Image: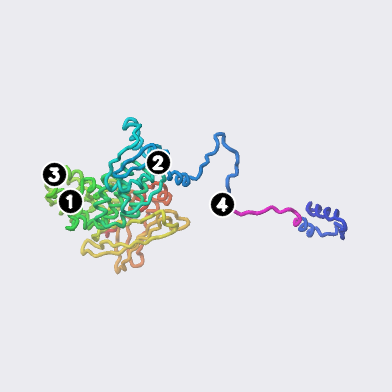
């Protein structure tokens, strides 16, 4: 049976006047191509955008449509300090601003209460606001933000503007100030300014992100802050809340946990603060929970037992010391499976002494690419005596080591060329700020040719768990690992 397109073309040719050859004389294949060429062709568009929903049907309730929000805010900014339609004047220091109650109340519950009939006369046309001198200087910028949702922040004006945002509970402006301070101010300030200005304010108002940022800035010099004469006044002047936040941090860079205990005792026994000495027992009870006794060596624990403060309060210290001795005595395999060894007391800090363990932080986990690898190097003790070091390397695959393996993989490498085999035990843990989350332990006879140990951490933690929103395995988008390596007896 002939193709209908061939027949159609022959019929078309037959109807043309003056046609030469008879229609049937055209070969079928030629007629097929000539018929295709004579058909109308539709346009072709290839888009990089996903196919849009072309359903034009409207729901019974209608469709939400929005205008240009930024333009609206820009238009509203022209009413800032403008007498047009102003229904209230704000007197701040020597300045007086024309304002609009609707704008103020929309942004602040404090202003809403202030302009209610219960607080002040609703017919009053001027209100005086009593502010700190540094806040008076930036009140204009603060007020303009309520109209325009825009502000220019600097190192000098951010803190007083944050103080106003806190006072009037303007949450949007508070967030803007905290973001700017944590990213652009605190990491670059001299430590004394961080300590005296931002850390003081952060702990007074309990801005957790500011506290964390200040501790991160102060942590590398924690040993100096606790021991050097030029920091003595600052250390002893810490209030209870400031000291608590300092002791709770795992980011502190210190020689060992014993130095932290000594610094705590120095703070309690400060001659400049006799009120602390009268409450010594109460303060010890409050702060002892933040000293990580299990992270002390047996030699340090033995020294601590003979410390006069410990001897004066044995009932307070004995439970902590017994738990620390037990932790030091058991094998790493036993530690990994013991749920009693999972609290914050078993979290490493950034100790600078040569030890059996090391804290490793992978910063910015969300920015690691798939199949990427990092190889941090560290050293541990190689024997109980003499105190020589053993160099290690940790090969970490944060988001999978292959297309078939999408788990968090960790491989331990020995960087020491061994003349003789060395049997070792190791434990690798993933932690957050409060707990040891997962631990894996193993044993390996390290030799010249067998110098790696593949941990089973990938069987405990998946990339999906790490990448999930509010993952318990992440601390401010950081992965924190603890590595412990000891020779087998």
Q: Which residue is mark 4?
A: 49
Instruction: Identify the residue at image location x=85%, y=57%.
Output: 24
Give the spatial CA distance, label 4 vs label 1.
Answer: 62 Å
Instruction: Identify the residue at image location x=85%, y=55%.
Output: 16
Above or below, 67 against 30 in this view is above
Give the spatial CA distance, label 3 vs label 4.
Answer: 69 Å
Q: Earlier in the sequence, mark 3 or mark 4?
A: 4
Residue 263 drawn at (x, y percent): 18, 53
Give the spatial CA distance, label 3 vs label 1.
Answer: 13 Å
In the current view of this chain or complex, which residue is farthest to the front? 83
Q: Is residue 262 left or right of residue 51?
A: left
Magenta residue span: 36-48
The answer to whether the residue labelled 3 contacts the one labelled 4, judged by CB atoms less than 8 Å apart, is no
Q: Nearer the viewer, mark 2 or mark 3?
A: 2
Residue 309 drawn at (x, y percent): 13, 48
Q: Earlier in the sequence, mark 4 or mark 1?
A: 4
The answer to whether the residue labelled 2 contacts the one labelled 3, judged by CB atoms less than 8 Å apart, is no
- Counting every numbered tag in the picture gives 4
Quarter of the figure that contains the C terminus: bottom left
Give the spatial CA distance, label 4 vs label 2.
Answer: 48 Å
Q: Which mark is residue 275?
A: 3
Give the spatial CA distance, label 1 vs label 2.
Answer: 52 Å
Q: Nearer the viewer, residue 296 or 41?
A: 41
Q: Quick one: label 1, few (<14), some, or many (20+) residues within 10 Å? A: many
In the current view of this chain or complex, which residue is farthest to the top? 118
Q: Nearer the viewer, residue 426 or 10?
A: 10
Q: Which residue is mark 2?
A: 83
Q: Which residue is mark 1?
A: 236
Q: Nearer the viewer, residue 95 or 277?
A: 95
Residue 300, picture quadrant: bottom left
């Amino acid at each position: 049976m002939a193709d209908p397109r061939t027949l159609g073309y022959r019929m078309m040719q037959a109807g043309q006047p003056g046609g030469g050859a008879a229609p049937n004389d055209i070969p079928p294949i030629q007629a097929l191509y000539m018929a295709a060429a004579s058909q109308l062709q539709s346009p072709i568009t290839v888009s990089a955008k996903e196919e849009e929903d072309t359903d034009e049907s409207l729901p019974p309730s209608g469709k939400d449509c929005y205008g240009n929000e930024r333009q609206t805010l820009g238009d509203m900014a022209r009413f800032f300090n403008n007498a047009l339609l102003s229904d209230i004047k704000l007197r701040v220091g020597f300045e007086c601003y024309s304002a609009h109650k609707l704008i103020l109340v929309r942004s602040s519950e404090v202003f809403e209460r202030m302009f209610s009939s219960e607080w002040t006369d609703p017919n009053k046309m001027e209100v005086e606001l009593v502010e700190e001198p540094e806040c008076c200087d930036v009140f204009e910028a603060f007020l303009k933000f309520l109209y325009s949702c825009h502000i220019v922040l600097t190192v000098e004006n951010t803190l007083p503007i944050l103080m106003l945002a806190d006072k009037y509970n303007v949450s949007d402006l508070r967030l803007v100030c905290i973001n700017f301070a944590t990213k652009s101010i605190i990491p670059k300030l001299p430590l004394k300014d961080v300590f005296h200005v931002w850390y003081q304010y952060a702990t007074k108002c309990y801005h957790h992100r500011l506290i964390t940022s200040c501790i991160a800035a102060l942590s590398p010099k924690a040993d100096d802050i606790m021991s050097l004469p030029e920091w003595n006044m600052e250390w002893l002047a810490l209030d209870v809340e400031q000291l608590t936040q300092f002791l709770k941090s795992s980011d502190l860079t210190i020689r060992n946990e014993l130095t932290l205990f000594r610094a705590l005792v120095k703070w309690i026994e400060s001659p400049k603060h006799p009120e602390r000495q009268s409450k010594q027992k109460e303060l010890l009870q409050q702060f002892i929970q933040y000293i990580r006794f299990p992270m002390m060596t047996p030699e340090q624990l033995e020294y601590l037992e003979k410390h006069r403060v410990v001897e004066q309060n044995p009932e307070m210290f004995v439970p902590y010391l017994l738990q620390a001795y037990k932790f030091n005595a058991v094998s790493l395999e036993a530690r990994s499976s013991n749920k009693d060894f999972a609290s914050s007391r078993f979290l490493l800090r950034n100790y600078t002494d040569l030890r059996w363990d090391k804290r490793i932080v992978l910063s910015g986990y969300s920015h690691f690419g798939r199949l990427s690898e990092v190889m941090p190097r560290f050293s541990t003790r190689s024997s109980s005596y003499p105190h020589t070091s053993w160099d290690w390397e940790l090969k970490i695959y944060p988001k999978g080591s292959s297309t078939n393996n999408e788990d968090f993989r960790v491989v331990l490498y020995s960087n020491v060329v061994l003349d003789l085999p060395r049997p070792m035990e190791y434990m690798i843990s993933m932690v957050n700020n409060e707990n040891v989350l997962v631990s894996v332990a193993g044993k390996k006879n390290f030799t010249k040719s067998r110098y790696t140990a593949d941990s089973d951490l990938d069987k405990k933690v998946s990339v999906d768990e790490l990448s999930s929103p509010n993952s318990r395995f992440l601390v401010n988008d950081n992965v924190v690992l603890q590595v412990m390596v000891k020779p087998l007896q």
